[in-house]
Image (spheres, grey):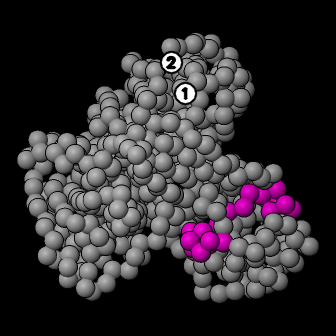
Amino acid sequence: MSILVIAEHDNASIKPATLNTVAAAAKLGGDVHVLVVGVGASAAAQAAAQIAGVSKVLLADAAQLGDGLAENVAEQVLKQAAGYSHIVFAATASGKNVAPRVAAKLDVAQISEIISVESADTFQRPIYAGNAIATVQSSDAVKVITVRTTAFDAVAATGGSAAVENVDAVADSGKSRFVGREVATSDRPELTAAKAVVSGGRGLGSLENFKILDPLADKLGAAVGASRAAVDAGYAPNDWQVGQTGKIVAPQLYVAVGISGAIQHLAGMKDSKVIVAINKDAEAPIFGVADYGLVGDLFQEVPALVKAL
Amino acid sequence: MKVLVPVKRVVDYNVKVRVKSDQTGVDIANVKMSMNPFDEIAVEEATRLKEKGVVTEVIAVSCGVAQCQETLRTAMAIGADRAILVETSVELQPLAVAKLLKALADKEQPDLIVLGKQAIDDDANQTGQALAALLGWPQATFASKVEVADGVATVTREVDGGLETVALTLPAVVTTDLRLNEPRYVTLPNIMKAKKKPLETIKPEDLGVDVAPRLKTLKVTEPPARQAGIKVADVAALVDKLKNEAKVV
C-alpha cells in the first residue's frame, strides 16, 4: 500500500502543514510518497525528501503549475494517482481547492478534514462546526482525504533521505488564468502555525481599536486572529478569521479578547492547549471553554496584561 | 446568460445540534431549518449580476427532501426566476449532489454556477469543486469578488495569507465566501411573488444519476468536552497562572 501526500509549499520550502499531513498519512500504514507541484520547486522537493518517514518525492515542475491553479494541479495529481491507495491533502485553502476535483474524477467520495485515523478505511471527522464527530468508513478503492492539520502532531522536518524523481508536467488547461495575489505582509507568525494566538471579537468595537492587540501579540510572539463577528463588522480582514468558516487553530496559548464565544468561533479554537478569555460579560460562553477567565474591560485589562508580562 | 444556483437546506446556523443518544446522527427533528448561509450569498450574488444586466436568468436548484421547496421559495424571494427540486429522501453526499448538478447543467446549459463554499451541516467543502471537475469547467472557490464580462469571470479568492485573483473562461463554477456580499432582507411582497414563480420537481432517476451514499457513517458522537477553568481576579493573578501553572509564557 502506498500513500501519496500532496505537499503544501512555496516552491522554496515546505510549509508546516505538510508535516502534519505526512503524520496523518503515516498512521494509514504504508509507504509515504510526497508530490510537489510547482515551478522552480526543486528546493521544496529537496526539503520534502528530508521529512521523516517519506520514502519518495515526486516533483512536477513547470510554469503552468506555478500558481496553484486547481485545474492544473488536480490534473497533475490524477496523472500520478495510479497505484496509490490514499491521496492525502492538507485541509488548507489550496488543499480544499484541489482535492474534491481529484476525488470527483476518480469517482470516489472525498473524506474531508479528518481528525483521526481509525484504520486504513475508517476516519473521524467533525460535522456541524465540531459539535459532533462522525466516524465514517469508505469502501472506495482510492481514498481521497483532507487532513485537519491541528489534529496531527507534525513529523520531524529532517531525518529522511528520500529520492527525488522528476515527473512530466501536465499541460495548461487553458480555462483559468492566474491574475494576481495580494499577500498580507506581516512580521507575525502565520495564524495556523503560531505557538500563540491573540484574537479579537466584536468587543473591540472598531478597526482602530483592534490595534490594542498588537503590543500583546508582540509580547507573546503571537499571531492575531479575529472572530467572525469582528470580520463581519469590518474590524479585521477575513484571513484572520478563526472558526468553522475560517481557520482552525490549536496553539499552545489562545487569548480571546472581547469574544463572546459563538459556536462557530469555538469550533476553530477549542483544541488550543491553554485558553485565556478577557470579556466584560461574566456570562459569555467563552468562559465555558477558557482555562483562565478575566472579567473586565478589555481596554484596561489588555494594556495592563502587556505591562505585567 | 443563465446562472444556476444550487442551494442546500440545513439546520439553521443559530441552532446548537444535539447528538442522538444511539449515536446514529444528530437530532434534527423539530429543529429550525434554513438555507445554507453561503448559498444565500450565492443567490444574492446571482441576483445582483442579473440586476446589473450581466445575467438574464437565475435558476435555483436544491437536492433533497420535499421540504427543500421552502428553501427554493426563499431563493426565489431573493431573486431567482425559477427553481428545480431534485427530490429524494436518500441521504445525499457531496459526490452525489455534484453528479445531480452536472446532469442538470448538461440540460440547462448555464454559463455560470454559483454556490456556497461549504454547507454548515456536513462541513465537507466539496460540491463546487467536484461539480467543476465533472463538467470539465474551471473553478474559483472562496470568492470575495466576482466580475463577469466578455465570457470571462474574474474572481478574487480568499486564500491563506491574503487574496488571489483568477480569470476563468466561462462556463465556470464559483463558490462563495463570507464577504462576497450581504444578502438582502427578504420582503413580504417578494415572498408573495416567489410563490407564483415556477418550481419544477424531478427525481434523481430522471437524471440517470445513482445517488447511493458512498461513505458509511458508523457512528456520530459528542466531541470531547472541554472543562471550564477558573476565573482569575486580576491581571496579576492571570500572569501568575500563565507563568507558573500553565507555563506557557
Residue at image mark 2: A169
Which amino acid lies under the numbered mark 1 shown in the image of this protein?
Leu
Q: Is residue A114 above or below residue A5?
A: below
SS of the residue at dot 1? helix
Q: Is residue A198 left or right of residue A263?
A: right
**At which x and y percent is residue B86?**
15, 56
Tell me which label, 1 or 2, sits earlier in the chain. Answer: 1
> What crowding class fits label 1: few (fewer than 14 Cα within 10 Å), some (14-19), or many (20 or more)?
many
**At which x and y percent is residue A7?**
58, 31
The verdict on residue A225 being magenta is yes
SS of the residue at dot 2? loop
**At which x and y percent is residue B205?**
8, 46
- Residue A65, quarter of the rendered image: top right
Q: CA distance from mark 1 to mark 2?
A: 8 Å
- Residue B221, quarter of the rendered image: bottom left
What segment carries the magenta color? A217-235
**At which x and y percent is residue A176?**
46, 36
